[in-house]
Amino acid sequence: MAKPKSTMRRKETMYGYIFVMPWIIGFLAFTAGPLLFSLFASFTNYNITSQMDFVGAENYQGLFTEDGLFWTSLWNTLYYVLFSVPLTTMGAIFLSALLNQDVPGIRVFRTLYYLPAVLSGVGVYLLWMQLLDPGTGMINLILGWVGIDGPNWLFDPAWTKPSLIFMKLWSVGGAMLLYLASMQGVSKTLYEAAAIDGANTFRQFFHITLPMITPVIFFDVVTSLIGGFQIFQEAYVMSSNGEGGPANSLLFYNLYMWRQAFENFNMGYAMAMSWILFIIVFILTMINLKLAPRWVHYEGGDNR
Amino acid sequence: MTSRQEDTRYVEEAGTTKDLQNPSYFQHHGNRKKMLKLINFVLLAAGSLMILSPLWWMLSTSLKTMAEVMSFPPTFFPESWNWSNYIRTWEAAPFTQYTINTLVITTLVVIGNVLSNSFIAYGFAKIPFKGRNVLFAIVLATMMIPGFVTLIPQYVLFAKLGWVNTYYPLIVPAFFGSAFNIFLLRQFYMTIPNELIEAAKMEGASHFYIWRKIGLPLTKPAIATVAIFSFNGAWNDFLGPLLYLNDENLYTLQIGLQVFKGQLNTQWNYLMAGSLLVLLPVIIIFFFFQKYFIQGINLQSGGK
């Protein structure tokens, strides 16, 4: 090429920015701009129509000291995350271990187990409301067959959150495929060597498979933690238009925030709530990242 | 299961070539393997029944008369198959209008996502420019932001633009890329050799031309994945329409189903018929385009 190198590079840079420009515009307009506005408005009594006076840390202070429902919603959300994340992770790993074998019909099995993961939305929530219905539902019918008197599920404050966790477990197939893909990437020679050394299937799983898929476990835990804290739709639909279920047992963090923002129009207050959530999720993710080198195994050396 | 004693025997035996030459060693080992496979198969088959039974229950309930739905104990198979329930459900609410609305939004969201993300991902994957790594790190970081943190200020933005009760808030952001899809497509672009792009540039082709004539055709499988994920996302979206659409004529299927639920209370046969109809397109697409779902999963895990 006759052109000098620096002109080429400048031209490439120009092209590069043209190509990523839609994302930059979208980021500024729909993410960065709103974030800044929200951070500012969380220190005001903004109500979208008439008022936006600076109130200092009043919103944050009020949440922590005067708002019982804030703590209820935070506790409900923590409960949900604490149980759903480990259960879905272990469930997905167990399932993918079963599906990583060469048994008849394995392709059909994989398809079936994955199917519920693509189904979501109001249809699925309605289905589970019916399945969990104490009188007419399937779950208690089946429990009855084995002599168990099923609970009142969505009508009993002690069972509402477990109900949602069961529903979540039904769609564990999404994460399962993620693990399966990773398991299939584990080199066959590792297993052959282990077999020669006399390691049985279970030992092979715990000493080869599990360490080799830790990067995916890490990814899954981080993303499902972030996702778990944002539970909203299930609770909204399954507790008649977001009322929060019996004894507020389904009043999750986002549901309460929704109420403050779009029903009471306490926008400043709700944005303060959203920042507290952001900070919680951020800290937990950082802890995850910090702990990762202790247990996540990257092929070709650590700390990649 | 074999006893622990036998396990240790393998360990001792396997070290010597004499034992490895002994055919009975392998035969015994083979039997154990077969046993495990059988257990594996039985577990998978039992699990499949558990996974599928909710879907069967949905179909079964949708075909029952209301008297049968309320009868105790509930029945697994409907006494009579009342397909007319589906017609009555469809006529009980403006589902045709909801379907048209949902299709309009979904189509535009899919087009927006495919075009914008493919374009942006090309920039991040194939054009070396100053600041690219920093920008891409920001793309990934945005995946960590809880949706509600931006949702509330975005609502303020769209309200000020006069976009509430229109489809703009649901469609326009799709044309500015999304972190997850950019990541997915970038992963796929990385598999296209740079030499191909360089050769085209030597011929005098611009990046626009290369993106259109080489990038788009070669990334078709990944684009299909993005299209299907976007379809699913838009079809199942509940939060967006719930927040932005007030006018019943604008309702989507998800909102329509939620309203329908409010009207019908516990008429489970019609509710299940409605749910199944809303889920059906997703189920059909899943069975036809499974490989693109799996492709998406593989691209995700490949990046870990």
Image (tube, coloured by chain):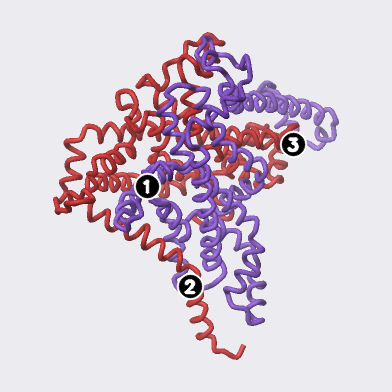
> Can see residue A102?
yes
Amino acid under label 1?
A: Tyr
Residue B42 locus on image (x, y percent): 68, 24
Q: Position of residue B66 (x, y in %)?
A: 52, 17
Examine the rendering and report whether any part of residue B54 can be seen: no
Disc nearest the viewer among 3 and 2? 2
SS state under label 1: helix
Q: Earlier in the sequence, mark 1 or mark 3?
A: 3
Q: Which one is nearer the viewer's eye here, B172 or A69?
A: B172
Outermost residue on the bottom side: it is A2
| Colour representing chain A | red
Marks counted in the figure total 3
User: Which amino acid lies under the numbered mark 3 shown in the image of this protein?
Assistant: Gly
How far, Cα to Cα, is label 1 from label 3? 70 Å
In the picture, the disc for residue B15 is 3
Q: Are marks 3 and 2 in contact (CB under 8 Å)?
A: no
Q: Name the colour assigned to chain B in the rendering.
A: purple
Q: Which residue is mark 1?
A: B244
User: Which residue is drawn at the image coordinates 61% and 69% (left, top)?
Assistant: B212
Residue A256 to residue A185: above or below: above
- Do marks 1 and 3 share a chain? yes
Residue to which mark 2 is pinned: A18
Output the chain of dot 1.
Answer: B
